[in-house]
């Protein structure tokens, strides 16, 4: 398999774009014409071929540019990566999980040779070759979690389990939908979810936490979450709200198809072997409304979901201000046809 990597930006001139292949494999998140929060967790067994679910860590045409964007964000704000002292072992677990998976799933891009604890890692797209000693932090340029997540698309939270709860005690977070690792670090499952409307009262978080605590090694799960973002910006953080918040006011009926993006998060769960921590990768996929509408069933369905969504969710997800313009634009793709459940 050969892979082409786009040369593109997620800020400034926003040259991010999706190829026809990226559009085809986009993880469209709606399996019906309406949406409300639920415990939408499913098994993550691998496959289908070519989909973003095929491998544990999807590598696509945006890989190299996303890693450059992470580098810029970290240079401006190093607190986007934090690990409390007791989480270093979980960082090594994560490094192992990712390196082993990528070398197996993308042998033309990544190589890992292991002789006991003497490891040799080659990352061809980013031009990295590194010999290091597994579990010896002095042999890497930074901590193990930071090292591997500077080379892996998506945000990462590492959760420590204690007192029947999960605690966000480490993470790499540079492409988040308006939440802050620096604010959330050290919080538990209910605390960091407190701003979410409705879900706690619906029992969603009690059920979800119970499920997550029972995840065992070797079991893999995923769920999809979504929101809306103006411009293809990865770093929609509270820290930089002054940069991207005002961009919401630039949406017009003429430009909404190009500038308004559906932001889908592929969230996965992995129990880590030595630390017993839970790894929670949050992989972000961005696609503008015009590209979504190239798939008639997606354009039709997105129109209905956004038209009928609970106002509290439109407000929380930050698109209430543009909802009317978005829905008017999408209505041209809705022929009124009956739809059946499924994506
Ligand atoms: C939102 C983290 C698992 C449901 C969020 C937010 C964070 C977060 C930081 C943003 C809250 C804010 O506004 O500040 C995590 C982590 C998880 C996890 C680290 C792994 C342990 C889950 C699970 C569910 C869930 C299993 C299952 C239902 C939600 C929902 C939202 C949310 C519904 C609101 C999203 C939106 O409307 O855009 N989560 N979460 N989370 N989370 Fe989680």
Image (cartoon, helix red, strand yellow):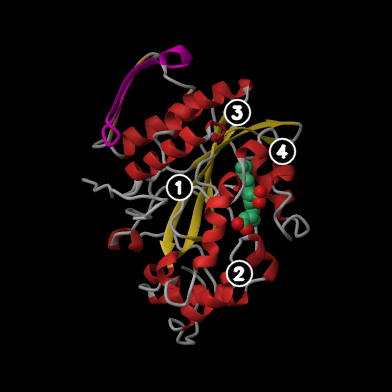
Q: Which label sits in the foreground, 2 or 3?
A: 2
Mark 3 surroundings within 10 Å by alpha-carbon count, few (fewer than 14), some (14 through 19), many (20 or more): some
Would residue 30 be seen by someone viewing this image from the given angle?
no
Q: Earlier in the sequence, mark 2 or mark 4?
A: 4
Q: Earlier in the sequence, mark 3 or mark 4?
A: 4
Q: Quadrant of residue 158?
A: top right
The residue at which mark 4 appears reads as 188
**Circles 1 and 4 in contact, beta carbons < 8 Å:** no
The residue at which mark 2 appears reads as 321
Q: Position of residue 156 (x, y in %)?
A: 52, 38
Instruction: Using the image, determine if residue 267 lies above or below residue 271.
Output: below
Q: Earlier in the sequence, mark 2 or mark 3?
A: 3
Mark 1 surroundings within 10 Å by alpha-carbon count, few (fewer than 14), some (14 through 19), many (20 or more): some
Q: Which residues are magenta?
A: 118-139
Residue in the foreground of this view, choosing between 250 and 320: 250
Q: Quadrant of residue 254?
A: bottom left
**Separation (CA) of disc 1 from disc 3:** 20 Å
**Separation (CA) of disc 2 from disc 1:** 39 Å
Q: Position of residue 286 (x, y in %)?
A: 43, 57
**Circles 1 and 3 in contact, beta carbons < 8 Å:** no
Is residue 128 within the magenta segment? Answer: yes
| Count of marks, rendered view | 4
**Separation (CA) of disc 1 from disc 4:** 28 Å
112 with respect to 189 (left or right): left
Is residue 227 within the magenta segment? Answer: no
Q: Position of residue 251 (x, y in %)?
A: 49, 69
**Circles 2 and 3 in contact, beta carbons < 8 Å:** no
Q: Which label sits in the foreground, 1 or 4?
A: 4
Q: Residue at x 58, y 51 (%)?
A: 241
The residue at which mark 3 appears reads as 276
Residue in the foreground of this view, choosing between 100 and 253: 253
């Amino acid at each position: 398999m050969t892979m082409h990597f786009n040369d593109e930006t997620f800020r400034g001139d926003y040259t991010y774009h999706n190829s026809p292949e990226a559009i085809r494999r986009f993880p469209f998140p709606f399996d019906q014409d309406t949406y409300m929060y639920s415990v939408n967790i499913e098994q993550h067994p691998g496959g289908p071929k070519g989909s973003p679910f095929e491998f544990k860590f999807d590598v696509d045409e945006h890989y190299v540019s996303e890693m450059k964007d992470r580098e810029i964000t970290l240079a401006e704000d190093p607190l986007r990566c934090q690990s409390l002292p007791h989480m270093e072992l979980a960082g090594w677990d994560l490094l192992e999980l990712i390196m082993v998976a990528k070398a197996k799933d993308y042998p033309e891009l990544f190589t890992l040779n292991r002789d006991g604890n003497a490891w040799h890692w080659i990352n061809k797209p980013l031009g990295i070759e590194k010999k290091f000693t597994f579990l010896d932090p002095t042999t890497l340029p930074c901590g193990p979690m930071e090292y591997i997540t500077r080379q892996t698309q998506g945000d990462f939270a590492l959760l420590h389990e204690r007192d029947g709860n999960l605690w966000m005690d480490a993470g790499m977070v540079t492409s988040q939908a308006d939440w802050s690792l620096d604010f959330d670090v050290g919080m538990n499952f209910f605390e960091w979810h407190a701003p979410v409307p409705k879900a706690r009262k619906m029992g969603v978080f009690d059920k979800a936490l119970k499920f997550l605590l029972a995840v065992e090694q070797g079991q893999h799960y995923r769920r999809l979450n979504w929101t809306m973002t103006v411009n293809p910006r990865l770093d929609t953080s509270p820290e930089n709200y002054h940069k991207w918040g005002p961009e919401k006011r630039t949406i017009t009926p003429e430009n909404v198809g190009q500038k308004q993006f559906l932001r889908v998060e592929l969230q996965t769960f992995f129990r880590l072997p030595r630390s017993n921590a839970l790894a929670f990768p949050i992989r972000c996929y961005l696609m503008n409304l015009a590209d979504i509408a190239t798939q008639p069933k997606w354009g039709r369905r997105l129109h209905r979901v956004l038209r009928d969504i609970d106002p509290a969710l439109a407000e929380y997800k930050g698109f209430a201000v543009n909802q009317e313009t978005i829905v008017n634009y999408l209505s041209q793709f809705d022929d009124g046809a009956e739809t059946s459940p499924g994506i």
